[in-house]
Image: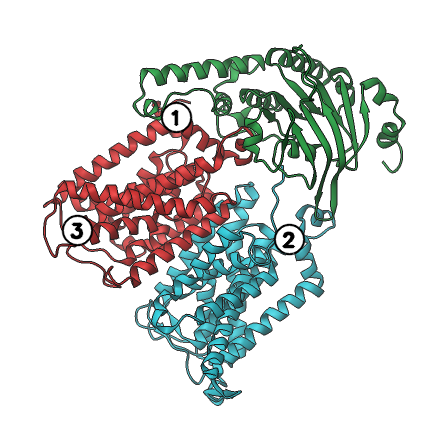
Amino acid sequence: MIDNGLLVQMILGALLGLSVYLPMAAGQLSLATPAFYAVGGTLAALLSTQGGAQSAISLWSVLGEMLLAAGLTAGLALLVGLPVLRLRGIYLAIATIALVEIVRVAILNLPFTGGAAGIFGIPQPFQQPFGYVLFSGGVLAVCGWLFQRLEASRLGRSMAAIRDDELASRCMGIHTTRVKLTAFVASAVLAGITGVIAAHYLNTWNARQGSFDVAITTLAFVILGGSRNWLGPVIGGLLLTALPELLRPVGDLRLVLFGLVILLGPVFFPQGLITPALLERLGRWKP
Amino acid sequence: MIDTLLQTLLNGAASGGVYALVALGYTLIFSVLGVINFAQGALFSLGGYLTYLLLGGKIGVNGALPGWGLPIGLPLWLALLLAALGSGAVGLLVERVAFAPLRRRGAEPLLSLITSLGAGVVLVNLLQLLMGAEGYAFPQAAAGLAKLPESLLLGGARIRTIQVLLLAISALAVASLSLWLERSRSGKAMRAVAEDPTTATLLGINSVAVVRLAFLLSGMLAGLGGGLIGMSVSLAGPYFGISYGLKGLAVLVLGGLGSVPGAIVGGLVMGLAEALIPSEASGWRDALAFAILFAVLVLRPSGLLGRRQLEKV
Amino acid sequence: MSGPSSAVPMLELRQISRQFGGLQALSEVSFQVEQGEIFGLIGPNGAGKTTLFNLLSGVTPASSGTIHWRGQAMQGLSPDRHNRLGIARTFQNLRLFTELSVLENVLVALHRQPQGSKLDALFNTQHFRRRQSELRERALQLLEELGLADQAHRQASGLAYGDRRRLEIARALATAPALLLLDEPAAGMNPRENEQLCELLAQLRQRHQLTLVVIEHHVPLLMQLCQRLAVLDFGRLIALGTPEQIQRDPRVIEAYLGGSR
């Protein structure tokens, strides 16, 4: 029932969930993931359709696109983050929503991005969905390893402290703005890279890929899966991407479902599915 | 030249008035609770649809109730009023479901941003399910509107009557609200809670009631705004409110979080700025609000008239 | 005690004032704290003691006046900069990292200690693991001094009240400060615990070469502990001197016992 195509989408969902999770792990609510996702996807779409229509593209080119997308999104994130992360959390939340809209409108109106219809015929590095499964799965595995290492590192501890009490963290000498900025930029890069993969997989790309709806969806991944550990958004992303596809009636109510998750989650299941208690019981993570 | 300028200014002021309504809604809640109600945009849409139905409009085929409509056609002022009340009531529901439980638990304020966002999403999508996503133009017989001239002559310029009406109604709403805040007991109570919640409670002010009142009024403002836009432009699917809600956030930051005059001034500035964008670049109009928002955050985060917030240690 | 006293006091406040809206929280407060001293700060509720700590730790800026740290003026610096300069604090209402364990609370505060490079962390190298265990050692040592080592793996929110106060001290100590600001460290303690706290603070000062400024409501504790005291009332400094001098000062007696109180 879960074919390779759905599997790819599930993995992309997990990656986007991780992107939303990163700023949250440092106590910041950012809804900017769709903006950077859109930037990455648009970049890949533009670059790979430059020389006219081709049906295939080498994996190396895609990796190159990912590198460029990383640079572009990092730069954009710095530009947005530097002024805003000095301010209270609420300003970041608002600014990131604004960013999503600006990027969406820009992609819609810029002469070379294909307008409302978008860009078609994006070449494929893989002939079969299975190739995408391996590739994106590999990216997810690398991310998992990085996140696991993050938790054991000074940066990860600082992020957890800031999330708990930012003022106390500052009084302990932690460069809180620097840490928050790092999380924000990393989140942007992850979203951008995911956008590159998605653009190739979907074969077309338009402004709607980076809409407010995506912000809702990806936020729901983290709320459901749990925001205390990186496994949470991964599980949330996998599940909530698969669910609407597998349960047809639910599929039509997709957004209502996500809305309910976001509305009721923090009230009834504040820690989501993958709670620290659960992890402790699974015995693989230290208390 | 003068007439197009005048027309543009009036258009700007009219839409600025609506922005002010949305921003005021945010401001009321922000000043008593310190959080943003992300369901505001959804309440805006709701107001638009309720007004439409109360005017006797019929819903479309894409919804669950195709071709349905209320068997009544109320006069415009009544429809707007009742729709605003309806939105206000739903606003109270949002408070009950999305805000109160978190406040009781002493949870982080940012979490209610998330839950209110969820509430907004559920609301908008329910609207879409029930009424369909197509656009609705308000019935022309919309009591009284047909009797008014299409446009007025003012100082040599032709301006749409509807714009004047929009501006007049939102000005009236804003003025009433300001007067209420300034003079009435409950208004003063709300300002007291906004200023210093602890002292207000010590003075015997029921802050729970004040919070609920803030949500009611905020919902009413949003609902009225939605009705006005529906009346002057049309309803372009339930999501139209979301974009007003988002722009309202930009106005909020521009005016200064928590400042009532700021929301009004900010709304007008935003409306005028948007109107001044030439029609060739109209696609970019939507992005202007957010560009302004970023400029404010970089240059002067407290906005035009905001106060600097202090953190208690 | 410490070596030859320097001509420059460790901490100096000159005409410090702070107002919030219409409220004057501090008015022209001036005093000095010498290196190695245990300095007390007392006064009725609302006298401005915690506000003073907020100024000293960079949480709030002064409205006027200057603060000199080791001879250098500190103006408008961020809280993290204050800490890097050697000033650490605890909080009246406790601001522990409640979701983290006792050990992690201290580990976070050890962030300035060498931890290996980012690459080391990434590949979990030998070097990284050695540094991490050194950090743990250090953290456990501090917890041991504060009597919390046996609860190292407990979540901070699960600690008894007195233990939480001590964890805050351990955490502040981990930032290797020269000046430690303690905001009501004895709150909620019984007389026996007060005694223990006095001993503990004296030991900590000795072992870590600290200067202490302590806010306390429990005046007898400070009389025993401190070399000198400053008394605030309505944001003004009304007395400064040794415990004996303070006890006999008529203005202090008035502030605490007389008038409308």
User: Same chain, marks 3 and 1?
Assistant: yes
> Along the horizontal axis of the image, is A103 left or right of B186?
left
Mark identifier at residue A153 = 1
Observer able to see residue B114: no
Give the label, 3 or 1, closer to the camera: 3
Mark identifier at residue A48 = 3
Mark identifier at residue B194 = 2
The amino acid pointed to by label 1 is Ser
Count residues near mark 2 (Cα–Cα under 10 Å), then give few for <14, some for 14-19, many for 20+: many
Please tell me whether residue C259 is drawn above or below residue B265 in the rendered image: above
- Residue at (61%, 52%) from the top-left corner? B307
Please tell me whether residue C29 is drawn above or below residue A217 in the rendered image: above
Front-lying residue, B192 or B8:
B8
Residue C97 at x, y percent in the picture: 52, 29
Residue B296 at x, y percent in the picture: 50, 55
Front-lying residue, A200 or B232:
A200
Report the Cα–Cα distance between label 2 and label 1.
Answer: 42 Å
Q: State the hue of chain C.
A: green
- Residue at (63%, 22%) from the top-left corner? C179
Q: Residue furthest front?
A: C7
Count residues near mark 3 (Cα–Cα under 10 Å), then give few for <14, some for 14-19, many for 20+: many
Give the label, 2 or 1, closer to the camera: 1
The amino acid pointed to by label 3 is Ser
